[in-house]
Amino acid sequence: MATDPNTNDKKHKREQDREQKRKALDKATKQDDTKKQGYWQKLKKTLSEKTGHKSRIRVLPIWLRIIIVLVLSILALLIGLMVGYGVIGDGNPMEALNWDTWQHIWDIVTKTE
């Protein structure tokens, strides 16, 4: 069975056309990376160029993260106290924050009156 030499040429030409179209599409859709980059990306790039290794830039420093976690934990504790005392215990939720309430609870626990 004989193969037509023109068929191979057509396939080859089709593949070349597809490749050219892909390159043209890539070139048309490619955007300048420097225009797209934000402040942190540019800073990270300059730091990695200076030091020779990639470094991570944190938006929030570790000490600030620790403070935020502590504040949120204390806030959750206070809300839990108010819900437990006011809703579950049928008392006034604001009384859960009074020192006299906690002194009374401590006296009951230690049995001193």
Image (cartoon, grey):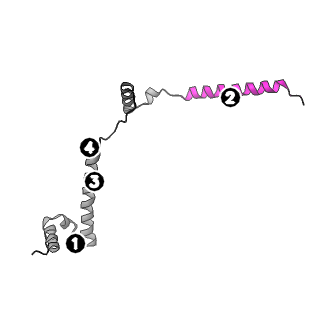
Q: Nearer the viewer, residue 61 or 42?
A: 61
Dot 4 or dot 1, earlier in sequence: 4
Which label was assigned to residue 91?
1
- Whether tag 3 and tag 4 are in contact, CB under 8 A, the answer is no
In this rendering, the answer to whether 90 lies above or below 45 is below
Q: Residue at x 25, y 52 (%)?
A: 71
Q: CA distance from mark 1 to mark 3?
A: 25 Å
Report the residue that reaches farthest toward the front: 52
Q: Mark 4 packing: few (<14 Cα in 10 Å), some, or many (20+)?
A: few
Name the amino acid type tagged 4.
Trp
User: Mark 2 falls on what kind of element?
Assistant: helix
Which label was assigned to residue 63?
4
Q: CA distance from mark 3 to mark 4?
A: 14 Å
Q: Nearer the viewer, mark 1 or mark 3?
A: 3
Name the amino acid type tagged 2.
Arg
Q: Nearer the viewer, residue 53 or 1?
A: 53
Report the residue that reaches farthest toward the right: 1
User: Mark 3 falls on what kind of element?
Assistant: helix
Q: Which residue is mark 3?
A: 72
Q: Position of residue 15 (x, y in %)?
A: 71, 28
Q: CA distance from mark 2 to mark 3?
A: 57 Å
Magenta stretch, residue numbers? 1-30
Residue 84 inside the magenta-drawn segment: no
Q: Residue at x 10, y 74 (%)?
A: 112
Name the amino acid type tagged 1.
Gly
Quadrant location of residue 113?
Answer: bottom left
User: Mark 1 falls on what kind of element?
Assistant: loop
Q: Nearer the viewer, mark 1 or mark 2?
A: 2
Q: Position of residue 76 (x, y in %)?
A: 28, 58
Which label was assigned to residue 18?
2
Residue 25 inside the magenta-drawn segment: yes
